[in-house]
C-alpha cells in the first residue's frame, strides 16, 4: 500500500519519538548500578529516606523579615504534615520548620514538600525533618511550557529540537556518566559523545544533506582543535582534573570504581562548548547553502567568502556568550574577591580561577575556529556540484 506524501512527515516523527523514548528508557535501565557506599544507611540498621509530604496545617509560627537582607525570612513554624510516599505514607505528624539563610521556606496549608525520615532499625520509631519544598512538578511544568513554546515557534523543526534535547541529555546523564564511572577515559568519552551528539541532533534539527554533513564534520574538527589547545595550556599552567574543588570526594569514588579523574576537566570543557559550536556551525552551513541555492554558479571562493561574512557577525557574540556563561557561574567567587581586595597574584593563579579562564578561552577558540573550518567544508561540498 502506497503511503500518501502528507502522511510521511507524521509517520517519520512518530518513529523518531518511539526511537528516542526507547533509547532513553534503555539508557536509564543500563545506567543502574549498586553504589559502593550507601549514603542512606545510618549507624546500625537505621536508615534515612526522603519522601513527599503535604502541609495539613500551621499550628503556630514566629517568622520575621531579616533586618538587612530583603526577601529573607528567619524564625520557625510548627507544622503538621502528612507523608505521601514511603514506608510511613498516610501518617500525619507535627514537625518544626526552621527558617534561616539557606532554608527560608515559609509554608502554608496545602504546600507540598520533601521531608527526611530517619527510621530506626525496627521501623517503629522515626523522626521527620523538613528538607525542601517539592519543586519537581513546578520544574517539570516549566520544562513542558518551554517545549511547547519551542514546538509552537519552530513547528516541526521545533518538535525535532525537543527530541534532540532529550537525546542529548539522555546521552550525557545515562550513557557518558556511567561509562566514565566504570573506567572509560573522560577525554575519549567526551569526543565520542560530541561525535554522536552532532551526528544525531544536527540531522534532527537541520535535516539530512550536505549542509548538515558540513556542520557535523566542522563541529567535531573544531572541538578536537580546541581540545588540543586546551591540553597544551593545561600542561603549561599545570592544571588537570585533580584541581576541581571536589577532588577529595572524587578520589574516594575513584578508589572503588574505574573513575579517571585527570580527564574530567577535558570532558567538562568539551561538553560545555559543544552546543555553541554546533550552533555556529549549522548557521554558517545554512548561510552557504542559501548562497548556493540562489546562485548555483558560485564557486569555492564565493561560497567561502559568504560563510566567513556570516561567521564574523556571529563570532564575537558567540565567544562573548561563552565568556559570560563561565563568568556567571563564578559570580559568587568574584564577589568574594572584590570584597576582600584579594591580590591579583593570588587570585589569578588559584586553581579555580585558572580552570574558569581555560574553560572560557578553550570554548571561545572552538567557536572562532568553527568559522573558517565550516565555511571551507561547506564551500567545498556545495562547490563540487558545479565542478562535476
Image: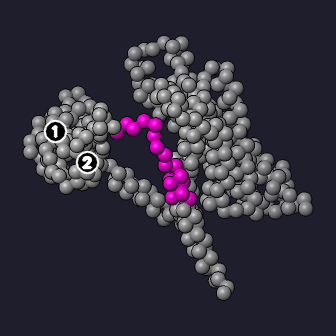
Mark 2 = which residue? 113
Q: Residue at x 30, y 45 (%)?
A: 50
Q: Which mark is residue 96?
A: 1
Residue at coordinates 60% horizontally, 37% vertically from top-left? 183
Residue 125 in which image quadrant: top left
Tell whether 387 sits left or right of 54. Answer: right
**What's the image's color scheme?**
one colour
Q: Which residues are magenta?
A: 23-40
Name above or below for residue 183 compared with residue 203: above
Indicate left or right for 263 with 291 as reference: left
Q: Report the disc number at residue 129.
A: none
**Disc 1/disc 2 C-alpha distance (Å):** 13 Å
Label pair 1/2, CB-CB below 8 angstroms? no
69 or 126: which is nearer to us? Answer: 126
Determine if residue 105 is in view. no
Question: Residue 181 is drawn in which quadrant?
Answer: top right
Task: Look at 47% across and 34% down and name the residue there.
Answer: 329
Q: Residue 104 at what x, y percent from top left?
A: 24, 37
Amino acid at each position: 500500500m502506497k503511503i500518501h506524501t502528507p502522511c510521511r512527515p507524521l509517520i517519520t516523527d512518530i518513529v523518531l519519538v518511539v526511537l528516542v523514548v526507547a533509547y532513553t528508557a534503555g539508557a536509564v535501565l543500563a545506567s543502574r548500578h549498586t553504589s559502593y557506599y550507601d549514603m542512606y544507611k545510618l549507624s546500625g540498621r537505621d536508615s534515612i529516606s526522603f519522601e513527599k509530604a503535604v502541609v495539613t496545617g500551621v499550628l503556630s509560627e514566629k517568622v520575621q523579615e531579616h533586618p538587612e537582607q530583603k526577601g529573607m525570612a528567619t524564625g520557625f513554624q510548627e507544622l503538621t504534615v502528612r507523608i505521601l510516599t514511603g514506608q510511613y505514607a498516610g501518617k500525619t505528624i507535627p514537625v518544626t520548620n526552621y527558617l534561616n539563610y539557606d532554608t527560608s521556606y515559609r509554608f502554608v496549608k496545602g504546600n507540598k514538600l520533601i521531608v527526611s525520615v530517619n527510621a530506626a532499625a525496627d521501623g517503629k520509631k522515626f523522626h521527620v525533618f523538613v528538607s525542601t519544598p517539592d519543586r519537581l512538578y513546578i520544574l517539570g511544568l516549566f520544562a513542558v511550557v518551554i517545549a511547547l513554546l519551542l514546538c509552537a515557534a519552530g513547528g516541526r523543526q521545533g518538535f525535532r529540537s525537543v527530541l534532540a534535547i532529550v537525546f542529548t541529555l539522555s546521552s550525557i546523564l545515562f550513557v557518558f556518566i556511567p561509562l566514565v564511572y566504570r573506567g572509560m577515559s573522560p577525554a575519549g568519552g567526551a569526543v565520542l559523545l560530541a561525535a554522536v551528539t552532532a551526528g544525531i541532533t544536527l540531522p534532527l534539527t537541520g535535516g539530512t544533506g550536505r549542509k548538515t554533513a558540513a556542520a557535523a564534520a566542522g563541529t567535531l574538527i573544531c572541538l578536537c582543535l580546541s581540545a588540543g589547545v586546551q591540553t597544551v595550556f593545561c600542561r603549561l599552567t599545570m592544571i588537570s582534573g585533580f584541581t576541581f574543588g571536589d577532588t577529595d570526594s572524587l578520589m574516594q569514588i575513584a578508589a572503588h570504581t574505574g573513575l579517571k579523574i585527570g580527564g574530567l576537566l577535558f570532558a567538562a570543557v568539551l561538553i560545555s562548548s559543544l552546543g555553541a559550536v554546533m550552533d555556529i556551525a549549522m548557521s554558517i552551513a545554512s548561510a552557504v547553502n542559501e548562497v548556493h541555492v540562489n546562485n548555483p554558479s558560485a564557486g569555492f571562493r564565493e561560497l567561502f567568502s559568504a560563510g566567513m561574512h556570516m561567521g564574523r557577525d556571529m563570532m564575537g557574540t558567540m565567544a562573548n556568550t561563552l565568556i559570560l556563561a563561565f563568568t556567571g557561574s563564578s559570580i559568587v567567587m568574584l564577589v568574594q574577591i572584590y570584597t576582600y581586595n584579594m591580590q591579583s597574584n593570588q587570585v589569578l593563579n588559584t586553581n579555580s580561577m585558572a580552570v574558569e579562564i581555560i574553560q572560557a578561552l578553550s570554548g571561545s577558540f572552538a567557536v572562532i575556529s568553527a568559522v573558517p573550518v565550516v565555511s571551507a567544508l561547506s564551500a567545498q561540498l556545495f562547490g563540487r556540484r558545479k565542478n562535476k
